[in-house]
Amino acid sequence: MTEKLGAKTTAVEVLAGIELTGKRFLVTGISAGIGLETARALVAKGASVIGAVRDLARAEAATAAVRDAASQGGGDLALVELDLASLQSVRACADTLLDDGTPFDAIIANAGVMATPFEKTVDGFELQFAANYLGHFALINRIERLLADNGRVVMLSSQAHRVADVDLDDPGFERQEYEPFVAYGKSKTATSLFAVEFDRRHRDRGIRAASVMPGNSMTDLGRHFSPEAVQELFETVGKARADAGLPPLELKEIPQAAATSVWAAVVADQDEIGGRYLEDCAVAPIDDTPNPFADGVKSYALDADRARQLWFLSEKWINVV
């Protein structure tokens, strides 16, 4: 492992000198981007990875590099179908994993969508809230007994959480105008709050949960942005950071963007990261300045009372009995 980890560290560098043979990970969304690189780095060190994907046929073709890394590193990859926007699919995926019964050392909730046009899922939830947060909430809670003692849960959040707190009264934009990027920010705040409450509920077994800001990178997550919209966003971010006296935004390569997820799942001290928000392979400082494009985490994304309220509402939303 490198002596100094930071924004430029790659997932492979995080795992330098570490052997993961016998370790098992569930990673959602491994067909492309950060999830694909996360899985590749893990299997290259001998880990077994179960990749949860929406399209099995696409994933079979897309994960060739992961299988190559597994064959060289002694790890292995298996796929399971999961559509996070369908609670029926979430339950079926969870039941498949429960029937197998093999425990996981860590779950990395990587899958997600960003800035989609307004859409409701088959269950009636706003798409981004469902795919980024509520589907993961349902999946992880249904299989939580498969988490090994001292296991870890890593929830991918985003700098976009700074755009908006989760709306507990109107998560589906029934009474407010829908703004795609605001909805994305709300869903990513929710993922951070999930980590806070899951950590509180399961730390007696040594299980710790954290949320991760992977870093800004060019993946197909931004496919709903036109080139013009991407350019406009970069200009807005650049101006906001310059006005605040912050350094310019630097995009990460995908191997760098996967590093904090892997660090949180394998390397980081559990007591240090439990219930926290992480970026650049470190615990992020709280920064409540109004600038939505600053670094660090808004305190509302770590609020324990807010996290409990969201948890209880989420149980009702998915009809947990």
Image (cartoon, grey):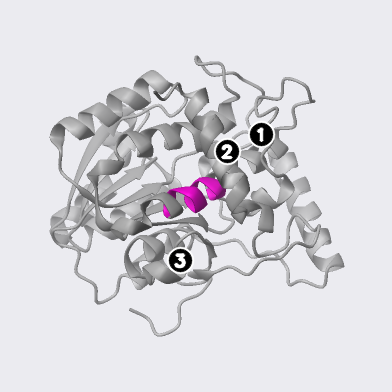
- Disc with the residue nearer the chain's start (2 vs 1): 1
Under mark 1, the amino acid is Leu
Q: Residue at x 21, y 64 (%)?
A: 45
Crowd band around label 2 with a 10 angstrom C-alpha radius: few (<14), some (14–19), many (20+): some
Give 253 or 264, whichever is nearer the viewer. Answer: 264
Find out whether the residues at labels 3 and 1 contact each other: C-beta distance under 8 Å: no
Give 127 or 116, whichever is nearer the viewer. Answer: 127
- Disc with the residue nearer the chain's start (3 vs 2): 3
Q: Secondary structure at mark 1?
A: loop
Q: Is residue 114 above or below residue 178?
A: below
Point out residue 192 in the picture as x, y percentages from the top left corner: 55, 50
Residue 193 part of the magenta-drawn span = yes
Point out residue 240 in the picture as x, y percentages from the top left corner: 82, 60
Under mark 2, the amino acid is Leu
Along the horizontal axis of the image, is 121 left or right of 72?
right
Find out whether the residues at labels 2 and 1 contact each other: C-beta distance under 8 Å: yes
Under mark 3, the amino acid is Ile
- Give the magenta range: 192-199
Image quarter for residue 247? bottom right
- Disc with the residue nearer the chain's start (3 vs 1): 1
Q: Residue at x 66, y 37 (%)?
A: 225
Q: Which residue is mark 2?
A: 310
Residue 108 part of the magenta-drawn span = no
